[in-house]
Image (spheres, rainbow, N blue to C red):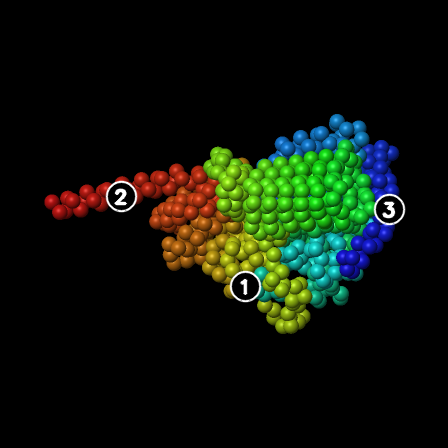
Amino acid sequence: MSHAHKSAKGAAGGEKGRGASKGKRGAGAGAKKPEDDREESLQAVVLADFEGHFSPFSQEKPKCLLPLANTPLLEYTLEFLAMSGVADIYIYCGAHSAEIEKYIQASKWYPPLSPASPFKSLELVKSTARSVGDALRDLDARDLITRDFLLVHGDLVSNLPIDAALAAHRARRIADKNAIMTMILRTAGLGQHRTKSGGVTPVFVCDPTKNRCLHYEEMHALQANKYLNIDPDLLSDHAEMEIRTDLIDCGIDICTPDVLALWAESFDYEVPRRHFLHGVLKDYELNGKTIHTEIVEEHYAARAFNLQSYEAISKDVLGRWTYPLVPDSNLISGQSYKFERGGLCKENGVMLARTCKAGKRTVLGRDTSIGDGSTLTNSIVGRRCIIGKNVTIRDAYIWDDVVIGDGTTVHRAIIAHEAVIGSQCKINPATLISYGVRISDNTEVKEKSRITRAKRIEDDVEEVVPSDPEIVGEGGKGYLFHEDDEDEDESNESFIYSTAHLNISSESISTITSSISIGSPTTSRSRLSSFAGSISDDGEAGSSNENFHHDAVSGLLDTLKENGDFDSAKLEFMGLRLSNDATDHQIRRAIAVAFTKRIAQLVEQEKLEPSKAAASAFGTSGAENFLKTVAVGAGKEEDQIDFIHCLQKDLVHRNQGAMILAAVCQRLYQMDVLEEDAFLRWWEECEMLAEGEAEEMARVRTKTKVFIDWLREAESESGSEEDDESEDESD
C-alpha cells in the first residue's frame, strides 16, 4: 500500500478517530477497573535515550525531550500509552536523567502531583544502564514487571489502537505459554517510503498462518552480499512463509515477563532486534519460545530514532497523517495552536508582516515575528523567534528563541534553541546548528555542517572549545562538531549522509539463494550473515560470522559451567570452526567472550572476587592447553595482542569489567599463556591511540595499569642486572 493511499485513509477517518481516541484514553485511565484485574491493568516500559542519537543536540539535552512540531517527543509516547489504557509506567533514562525527571514531575502525566494524570503510577527508574540490554537486565533484577507489558521507546509517535493486537497476544499466551512476545509492525510497500530507514532494511521471515516470526536479519545499504540464507528446517517445518522487506518496525512490543528472563540470560544482547530477536529465533530449538507479529495497514506508528526519521515524521505531522497527534490538538498545557486555511498552523500572539508569506504546511509558535518579504514553506518554527525581512525558509526545523537576520536563506536545516543567525547568511541543506550558536553576518554554512558550542569532555573534565571563525564567521560562536566528540557510534544519521547516489534498493535483496533446497547441503548462514558491524563483526570487512560466534561461545560456556573437559570440547570447537570457515580473529574473540562471560557470572552470581573467579575459570580441566594451542596458536606476539584486545573489548559492558580484566591478565601471565612482551606492546599501542580510543575502552583497562607497571619495573631490573653481568665479564 502506498504512503499516500494509507495517509488518505487515515486523514479521511481522522475526525471520527479523534473522538474515539480521547474516549479510549478515558477508558484506559478510568477508576472503574478493579485494581486486582491483572489482565486489564497494563504495564509499560519506556526506554528513553538508548537507541539512536541526535548529535550534537543530544550531547546537551535528552533526546526524548527534543521538540518535534514544537512538542517534546516523550509527550507523543505518553499520549499513545494513555490511549492504550496503560496503568503503570516505568521510564528508563539512558542519559540526562535529572532533566527528564524534572520534566515529568512538572507535567500532567505525573500521578502524585497531577490529579488529571491517566496513569495509576509513573516511575523513573534510575540506573547506570548504557544500553537497552543493560536496562532490561536491570529491570528483570528489580522484579517490577508482574504481568504483560508494553515495551516502547521515548521517541514513538503513534495513533495506533492496540486492542486487537493485545487481544490476539493474550489469546496466544493462554493457548501456549511459550508465545512470549508480539511485535507491532506497519506496512509501507516495496517502493520508497520516507519513514523507512535509509541505511538498514529489516527483513522479517514470517509464517502468515500463525502470525509468527521465524527469522530476522538486517540488510545494510553498503554490504556486498545481500542474501538471506534460511535454515532448511524452517522451509520443511512450515508450509507457508512470507519474506517481508516492506515493514516499518515502529518499536512497539507486547511482552510477557519471560522476555526479560531471556534478556537476563545473555549479556551479549544489547539491542532489541539485531541481537535479541535474531538470537531468540535462532535458538528456538533450545528455548522453545515463539515471537509473533501484528501487521497493521491503518493508522500511524513510527520512531524518531535518528535525524532522518525525525525529518520524515515531522513531514507526516505537517501533512496531518498522525492525526490526532497534530499541533492543533494542543497536547501540552498552554498551547493554543489553530489550524488555518492554506495549511498554516499557528499559536496566539504570532506577528506576521503584511508582505510575508507563511503557509503550505507551516507551524508557528507563540510570540514569533516574521518580517516583510519573508517566505516560509514546509517548516516548523518555535516560540519567541525573530525572523527578519526577506528571509527564505524551506523544509527547516527552527526551535524556540532563535533569531534570523535579514536576507538570510535557510534550507532543510535544524536550528536549536537560542541560536542566532546573522544577516545575509546562507544555511545550506543538512546543516545542524546547536544550542546558542551564533553565525556572523554574510556567512555561508557549508552543507552537512554540524556546529555546536558544547564543552568537550576530556578525562571527565569539561573543556571550553574556542570558536572557529572559518565556520561561524568573525565574532561568531561555535565550532564544527566531529564524530570523535561522540560517546556512542552514530552510524545512521541519514539526515546528513545520503546514500541516494548509490542507487540502493531493497529489490536487490536475494531472499533465498538458488543453491538452497530441502535436505541438501547449504552454505553456512554465518558466511552470508548481513550483520555488518554487529557484535561478532568486530569491524572487519567481510568477516561477519554471527552463527559461529554464538554457537562457539555457547559451547565453551557450557563446558565452563559444567566444569567439563576442554580436551573434548576442543574437537567440537574445531569442527565448528571448519564448518563456518571462521578466521583466527573470530576464534580468539569467541574464546575471549566465553571466558570473560563465565568469570563475570562467577563474580555477580557467586560473589567471587575477580581474581578467584579467573582462577576458577582458567583452572577448568584442559583450559590451559586449549588456550595455548587454540587461542594464541604458535604464540605469535600479534595473536597474543589480538587476544588481549578481545578480552578488553568484551569486558567494556560487563560489571566490574576493569577489575576482571586486571585479574585475567595476571592469571594468563602466570599460566604462561600470554607473554610479557605482548602485554607491554598492547599497552603501548593503547597509549599511542589514546586520543582516538573510545572512553569505555580506556576506562576498562585502568585497573590493569598496576600490573603493567610491575612488568615494566621487572623488565628494567632485569635489564640492569644483564648490564652489570656484561660489565663484570668485560673486567
The circle drawn on residue 718 is 2
The circle drawn on residue 199 is none
Residue placed most toward the observer, 109 or 715: 109
* Amino acid at dot 2: Ser
Look at the image and tell me in which quarter the N terminus lies: bottom right
Q: Residues within 10 Å of mark 2 (few under 14, many from 20)?
A: few
- Compare marks 3 and 2 and give the one earlier in the sequence: 3
Residue in the image at 78% along x and 39% along y: 337
Element on which disc 1 rests:
helix
| Place of residue 699 in the rendered image (x, y in percent of width and height, measured from the top left) | 48, 40
Q: Quadrant of residue 338?
A: top right
Proximity of marks 3 and 1: CB atoms separated by less than 8 Å: no
Proximity of marks 3 and 2: CB atoms separated by less than 8 Å: no
| Place of residue 79 in the rendered image (x, y in percent of width and height, measured from the top left) | 77, 40
Element on which disc 3 rests:
helix
Question: In the picture provided, is 33 more to the left or to the right than 319?
Answer: right
Is the residue 348 above or below the residue 216 in the image? above
* Amino acid at dot 1: Asn
Instruction: Note whether residue 392 is visible.
Output: yes
Element on which disc 2 rests:
helix
Q: CA distance from mark 2 to mark 1?
A: 45 Å
Write down the residue under mark 1: 580
Question: In the picture provided, is 508 more to the left or to the right than 669?
Answer: right
Question: In the picture provided, is 663 more to the left or to the right than 216?
Answer: left
Is the residue 104 above or below the residue 553 in the image? above
